[in-house]
Amino acid sequence: MKIAVISVTNQGDKISEKLREFFQIALFSKNIISNFDLMSITKHLMEDYEAIIFISSTGIAVRGIAPYLKSKATDPAVIVIDSTGSFVISLVSGHLGGANELTLKVAECIKALPIITTATDRLGLIAPDIIARNNHLVIDDLKKAKIISSKLIDGKKIAFVDDAMEISIPKGYIARGEVAEGIVHVTNKQDLEETQGINDLETLKLIRKNIVLGIGCKKNFPADKMRKSVLNILKQNNLDIRAVKIVTTVEVKKHEAAILELNKFLKSEINIWSLEEIKTVQHKYIGSGFVEKTIGVKAVCEPCVELSGGTLLTGKIACNGMTICIGEIENK
């Protein structure tokens, strides 16, 4: 975690030195920086750091960050340590930004009292955004996440469903099949058939990024055409585009603009495999003599999915000059 510390007193500087024993921090001290400008420094830190620790009053911290707050989905964690080092307060982005977790760690390190006011945490419940953060899931709708959290706080029954059955039912939730007033559904699907038509249930989708796309294509394949083809195939297979974790291909295509732009569009990782690596598994798939003559291997998309750790959900799908194979990665 990239952490910045803002200190406005001598005592704050001493506390920051204590923090250095446990964390890698960048210190912005009023005693060190000439022409110290809290607002301009805070603006810079809000954009470039994952967490900001104010060693000051909460009032100073609130005034410093207020103009630059955007969204709980993007704001960094902000915590406050009082000038005596007695209290550590989680101020902003307690869940998604990790401020609550950082507050507990800092408080333990400097022997202070952690102050966390998030209702679900105080009640010992696990909010949907914490489930998402701890399991690297994408929250489909932040407003629905807030509604589900409110229902949990009010003592309403919320069902928890994980398609892959990898996450145990969190504290405060019930299993599917019991009477509930809301559902948190972990999935890589675009549409959730089992909850369609149940209008009185608030359903929050948490998207698991476990889809791998093996891609092969002709040289200089149009990027726009590839993107549209991939989106259409994902839709046909009822897969959420945000579930794509990896785009993978052969080394001779590593500079192909269409594949690179697709990877950027999907905000995914990219895996490139050598001809030698592909040759170790290509015998399992129906290949093309023309492709083998052209690039040195007879199959691309399916072997690349397998090498990336994916279980094939589809075979090779041909799309007018490109091929795609969809796989699913098991999170271990």
Image (spheres, rainbow, N blue to C red):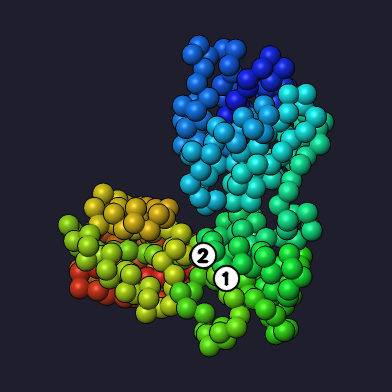
For mark 1, give the secondary structure. strand
Q: CA distance from mark 1 to mark 2?
A: 7 Å
Residue that carries the numbered disc 2 in the rendered image: 141
Say few, some or many: other residues with alpha carbon within 10 Å of mark 2 (under 14 / 14 to 19 / 20 or more).
few
- Front position in the image: 310 or 84: 84
Q: Position of residue 140 (x, y in %)?
A: 51, 65
Residue farthest along the bottom direction in this orientation? 197
- Kindly tell me whether residue 32 is visible in this rendering: yes
Residue at position x 51%, y 43% in the image: 69
The part of the image, by quadrant, that contains residue 277 is bottom left
- Residue 173: which disc? none
Residue type at the position of mark 1? Leu
Placement of 202 over or under 222, stated as above or below: below
Residue type at the position of mark 2? Asp
Residue 299 lies left or right of residue 28; in this view the side is left
Q: Are marks 1 and 2 in contact (CB under 8 Å)?
A: yes
For mark 2, give the secondary structure. loop
Residue at position x 34%, y 53% in the image: 264
Q: Position of residue 253 (x, y in %)?
A: 27, 54
Q: Position of residue 180 (x, y in %)?
A: 70, 80
- Front position in the image: 301 or 205: 205
Q: Quadrant of the N terminus?
A: top right
Residue that carries the numbered disc 1 in the rendered image: 204
Residue 170 lies left or right of residue 217; in this view the side is right
Residue at position x 61%, y 44% in the image: 92
Say few, some or many: other residues with alpha carbon within 10 Å of mark 1 (under 14 / 14 to 19 / 20 or more).
many
The part of the image, by quadrant, that contains residue 318 is bottom left
Q: Quadrant of the C terminus?
A: bottom right
- Kindly tell me whether residue 315 is visible in this rendering: no
